[in-house]
Amino acid sequence: MEKSGVKLIEEPLEVVLASPRGFCAGVDRAITIVEKALEKFGPPIYVRHEIVHNLHVVSRLREKGVIFVEQLDQVPEGAHAIFSAHGVSPQVREHAIERKLEVLDATCPLVTKVHVEAKRYAEKEFIILLIGHREHVEVEGTFGEAPDQIIIVGTVEEAENLELPKSCRVAYLTQTTLSLDDTAGIIAILRRRFPEIEGPAKDDICYATQNRQNAVKKLAVEVELVLVVGAQNSSNTLRLVEVAENSGTRAIRIQSSSELEPAFLEGCSRIGITAGASAPEDIVQGIVEKICQWKPECRVRELKLTEEQVSFGLPLQLKSL
C-alpha cells in the first residue's frame, strides 16, 4: 500500500510525546522580546547571534524584518539591538554603549544568574572553574565576566588533569544546558581534587533542561526509538540525544518533518518524540502528522512527567505592550 509515493509501514505504531518538551520560559521570553520590539519600534531590529538556536524560529523572525548579526559592528549606530537568550560578555555590552545602540536584553534570567555568580567569585579573587563547552556562545559570555580568573572545564579528563596553585580559592559554575549526568561526574572529580571548592547554592543547570532530560529518561524505557527535534547547534538538544542513547535507546535528531524518513521507523512498534528548549511545538506536530500520514492507524499519547509554570518578565522598555 502506498500514499504519495511513500510505502506505508505495516506494523502497528504508537507515538509517545514526552512532556515537558520544546520551548522553555527563557526561550519564550526571548522570542517575545523580539516580536514586541518589532511591534513597538518597527523593522529592522538587529539581534546579536541567533536569538535561540533554532533555524525555524530564526527564519520566521527574519521574514518579519529581524537582522541577525554576529558582531555589533554590523549594526548601524543608534539602532535597536537585542542580545540573544545565551547572554553576552561585559565587553559586548561596552561595545553597544560605544555605538549608542538602543539595547534590549533577552538573556535568559538563569544565564544571568551564572554571570552574577561569576562576578561575585571574581571579586573575592577565586579561580572559577566553568564547566561547559568552550565553543558555546553562553560559555563565551560567562567567560567574559572574568577572563583572567575563569578556566573552562569541558570533560572529566580535563577536571582530572587540572593543575592549580595550592593556595588559591576555587569555585565552580556550570553552563545551563549541559547533561546532568556529565556535569555530576565533573563536579565529583573537582570536589575530590579540591575539597574546599565552592559552588552555587544549587546546580546552574536550568529547570527546563533538567525536566526535559528526566522526561527523556522515562520515555526511553518505553520506546524503541526517540526522535529529538532541534538544531545541531542547540546544546540542550544534543544532550537529549545523549540522554536517550545512554538509556540504551536509539535516538535521531531532526529539525523538522522534512528530515523524517520511513526507514527511521522500520521495526518500531513504539517511538518517542521530544524537543529541545528552542524547538517550536508546531514543528513537533508536523512530524507527528507526517508519521500518521504514513501510518494512519498510529496512536498518539503524551507521557507527562511534570507541569512547568515558570515565566519571566519582559524588559522595562516593553512592559507597556
Image (cartoon, grey):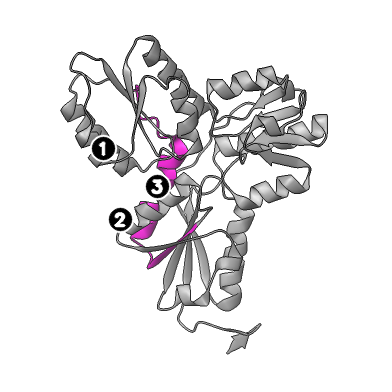
| Real-space Cα separation, disc 1 to disc 2, in angstroms | 21 Å
In the rendered view, tell whether residue 116 sits above or below residue 264: above
Secondary structure, mark 1, is: helix
Q: Residue at x 39, y 10 (%)?
A: 123
Return the residue at label 3: 213
- Between circles 2 and 3, the one closer to the viewer is 2
Return the residue at label 2: 246
Q: Quadrant of the C terminus?
A: top right
On whether residue 2 falls in the magenta region, the answer is no
Secondary structure, mark 3, is: helix
Q: Viewer-proximal residue, 170 or 218? A: 170
Q: Viewer-proximal residue, 240 or 174? A: 174
In the rendered view, tell whether residue 254 sits above or below residue 148: below
Q: Position of residue 9 (x, y in %)?
A: 50, 82
Q: Residue at x 40, y 78 (%)?
A: 267
On whether residue 226 falls in the magenta region, the answer is yes
Q: Residue at x 31, y 38 (%)?
A: 183
| Real-space Cα separation, disc 2 to disc 3, in angstroms | 11 Å
Residue type, label 3:
Gln
Which mark is drawn over residue 158? 1
In the rendered view, tell whether residue 137 sits above or below residue 248: above
Q: Position of residue 147 (x, y in %)?
A: 42, 22
Secondary structure, mark 2, is: helix
- In magenta, the rendered stretch is 200-228
Residue type, label 1:
Glu
Quadrant in the rendering for residue 128: top left
**Side (left or right) of 131 relative to 280:** left
Q: Position of residue 46 (x, y in %)?
A: 72, 34
Q: Residues within 10 Å of mark 2 (few under 14, many from 20)?
A: some
